[in-house]
Amino acid sequence: MDTQTAAVLAAGFVMGIGSIGPALAIGNLVGKALDGIARQPEAANQIQTSMFIGIAFAEAIALYALVIAFILIFVT
């Protein structure tokens, strides 16, 4: 196996593993936010704002994995 093939396989592995955590976090975060909105509809705006900030932080981790995958593919 040459280095380019290994780099592409490693990039796929990085994206696969690096996306599991953020996906679980976003799913959990949205579920809890919807539960909170169902319990207190008057606090929906505050809950949604906090939810979107949390989603952005969780999604940043997946973007870091994407950057590492690009580095693996294009630097080697």
Image: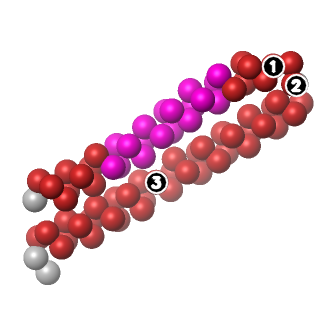
Relative vertical location of residue 73 with respect to residue 6 in this rendering, above or below: above
Relative vertical location of residue 59 with respect to residue 76 in this rendering, above or below: above
- At a point 42% along the width and 62% down the height, the residue shown is 16
**What residue is shown with label 1?**
43
Q: In which image quadrant can residue 1 be found?
A: bottom left
* Residue 42 x, y percent position in the rendering: 86, 18
Of mark 3 and mark 1, the one earlier in the sequence is 3
Badge 3 density bin: few <14, some 14–19, many ≥20, Cα 10 Å: some
Which residues are the magenta region? Answer: 49-66
Classify the position of the C terminus by image quarter: bottom left
Give the residue type at disc 3.
Ser
**What residue is shown with label 2?**
40
Specify the color scheme.
secondary structure
SS label for mark 2: loop
Q: In which image quadrant can residue 69 be found?
A: bottom left
Q: Quick check: 10 left or right of 40?
A: left
Q: CA distance from mark 3 to mark 1?
A: 30 Å
Q: CA distance from mark 1 to mark 2?
A: 6 Å
- At a point 33% along the width and 65% down the height, the residue shown is 12
Give the residue type at disc 2.
Gln
**What residue is shown with label 3?**
19
* Residue 48 x, y percent position in the rendering: 69, 26
